[in-house]
Image (tube, rainbow, N blue to C red):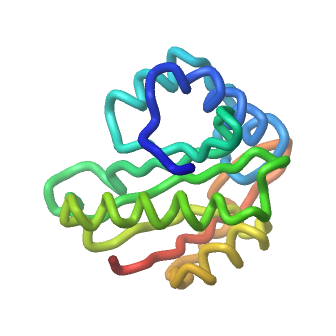
Amino acid sequence: MIRGARAGDAAAIAAIWTDVITGSTATFTTVPKTADAVTDVLAAQPFFVSETAGTVSGFATYGAFRAGPGYARTAEHSIHIAPAARGRGEGRALMAALEAHARGRSIHSMIAGLSAENAAARGFHAALGYREVAHIPQAGWKFGRWHDLVLMQKFL
């Protein structure tokens, strides 16, 4: 089931996000998320969760791509699914909800910032109609080495 995130989901979201932060290059962020930090994000931007048997199993959110009014109709999203829930269509369902919400807010363009080495994320986004628009070498530093950033875009 896909639904809007609630404050009571913050700890579960933080656990999924922290697993991604500490165990992968899916994000170049290095500071684990706390429930309090997630609660702040929930209050600031659209946030959706997938729920299986009463447990949050993934999330997706979007916010401003860049500051300033000229970028107001371009958004950047994040999506993460717990390992045990991958391959069940939850990511596609979350993205459908996220994109529908963004369209309702007159968002014209959605951006995904992905680690170039994350073939699964690149394939997932390509299957949803995103196309690669930029490849930025050595944009992120994590786990003692540089990582390239790929930007993928979809016009909504």
Identify which residue, 114 or 46, lies in the foreground.
46
Residue depicted at 75% across the width and 62% down the height: 88
Q: Quadrant of the C terminus?
A: bottom left
Identity of the residue drawn at 41% across and 51% down: 62
**Measured from the top left, where is residue 53 in percent x and y?**
70, 38
In this image, 125 relative to 73: left or right? Answer: right
Q: Position of residue 35 (x, y in %)?
A: 57, 18
Residue 79 in the figure: left or right of residue 122: left
User: Quick check: 68 above or below 19?
Assistant: below
- Pinpoint residue 137: horizontal percent, then vertical percent: 66, 68
Residue found farthest to the top: 36
Return the x and y of residue 74 as percentages of the image width and height: 30, 64
Q: Give the tally of numbered discs.
A: 0
Residue at 42%, 41% in the rendered image: 4
Identify the residue shown where x is 67% and y is 46%: 28
Among the 4 quarters of the image, the one containing residue 107: bottom left
